[in-house]
Amino acid sequence: MKIAVLPGDGIGPEIVAQAVKVLEALRADGAKIEMETAPIGGAGYDAAGDPLPDATLRLARSADAVLLGAVGGPQYDTLDRPLRPERGLLRIRKELNLFANLRPALLYPELAGASSLKPDVVSGLDLMIVRELTGDVYFGQPRGIELRNGERVGYNTMLYSESEVRRVAHVAFGIAMKRGKKLCSVEKANVLECSELWKEVMIEVARDYPEVALSHMYVDNAAMQLIRAPKQFDTIVTGNIFGDILSDAASMLSGSIGMLPSASLDEHNKGMYEPIHGSAPDIAGKNLANPLATILSVAMMYRYTFADAATAERIENAVKRVIARGLRTGDIWTEGTQKVSCSEMGDAVVKAL
Ligand code: IPM
Ligand code: MG
């Protein structure tokens, strides 16, 4: 298996280095994996004048899976829009057709105190958000900023085709089948035609999955319910922008955004794996970041692309063990636990593995 390693910007290189240690440990144990590194985001711009250099895209296409750190940084915010780091991320998702983004939110019992919600609201939480990743207002045309009647207007287009909704629906129903057989489709069908179509297609696809209980929720209510009573959800499926927002909210249920991995899959389960958090420029280069979301992204790589659930569980259990031992990076540290650096956390996971 060939893995394209794209560390990116900010804390990206530090956290990816820890995940690479885990992969190297697995290789030392006999796993047949090959890794090759390339720049993306601001690092791509610095190296080749492009947030997604051709060579990086070629490597990603030729790989079985992509491991990504994070992109972005204040030094790139004034670049022309197509040159900004975020554009590199959006383009690689689109170019590789990674339309199904899986964002689990799981609470480790020992971290209940790190969540800003009451422990009884979040303890036992195990939720999966399936976010559509290559459509919606992120990519819809037309888009732009232009002069109309003597003033500037900015506009984007929220757009989904039936086939785009149908394929992500099938992924979400498939995942719900393997979990609690409850799927909640989140949209804004009381206002948006785009959501009306989304909901109709969800109901059509549901006929193929009679065992799954499909429900529907408006996104504003879903935001509230996620904070009020998150354990009512098993699997959520939603569009690109709603999923972007709801997955950040859901991350806080699990104590820290530094804990949550993600998988972005195409229809053949080729995937890109990345933590859901960003590049955290404020702590970059200080060996303070939490590498667990990136390490858990490697576990997802084993589960979804390599179809090796045993190794995925082995990595997840190693993470559970270091948490149970009381090791914490700053973002999940609470009184009475042991504060460790990013690289110490990585070493501890390798040892537990
Ligand atoms: C995410 C991020 C990206 C997104 C940004 C960096 C473009 O917020 O992966 O959730 O909006 O999709
Ligand atoms: Mg986001």
Image (tube, rainbow, N blue to C red):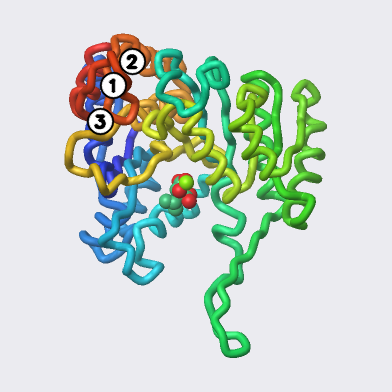
In the displayed structure, does residue 135 sit left or right of residue 335?
A: right
The answer to whether residue 179 is above or below residue 144 is above
Pointer 2 with pointer 1, Cβ within 8 A:
yes
Q: Residues within 10 Å of mark 2 (few under 14, many from 20)?
A: many
Can you identify the residue that label 2 sits on? 323
Cβ of mark 1 under 8 Å from ligand 2: the answer is no
- The residue that disc 1 covers is 328
Where on the picture, by quarter, is residue 75? bottom left
- Point out the tag, 3 or 1, that comes first from the N-terminus: 3
Screen quadrant of the C terminus: top left
Local packing at callout 3 (Cα closer than 10 Å; few below 14, some 14-19, many 20+) is some
Secondary structure beneath disc 2?
helix
Give me the residue at 52% from left, 49% from top. 97
Q: Which residue is mark 3?
A: 20
Question: Marks 2/1: CA distance?
Answer: 7 Å
Mark 2 and mark 3: Cα distance apart in space: 20 Å
Q: How many marks?
A: 3
The answer to whether mark 2 is within 8 Å of ligand 1 is: no
Q: Earlier in the sequence, mark 2 or mark 3?
A: 3
Residue at 30% x, 23% y: name it. 333
Q: Amino acid at mark 3?
A: Val
Q: Amino acid at mark 1?
A: Arg
Residue 68 in the image: state x and y as whole percent: 34, 41
Instruction: Using a 10 Å C-alpha cutoff, classify the residue at mark 1 as few (fewer than 14 neighbours), some (14 to 19) or many (20 or more).
Output: many
Quadrant holding the N terminus: top left
The location of residue 188, given as percent across then percent down, is 72, 49
Residue 232 visible in the snapshot: yes
Foreground label between 2 and 3: 2
Q: Hey, what amino acid is under mark 2?
A: Ile
> Is 237 placed above or below 50 here?
above
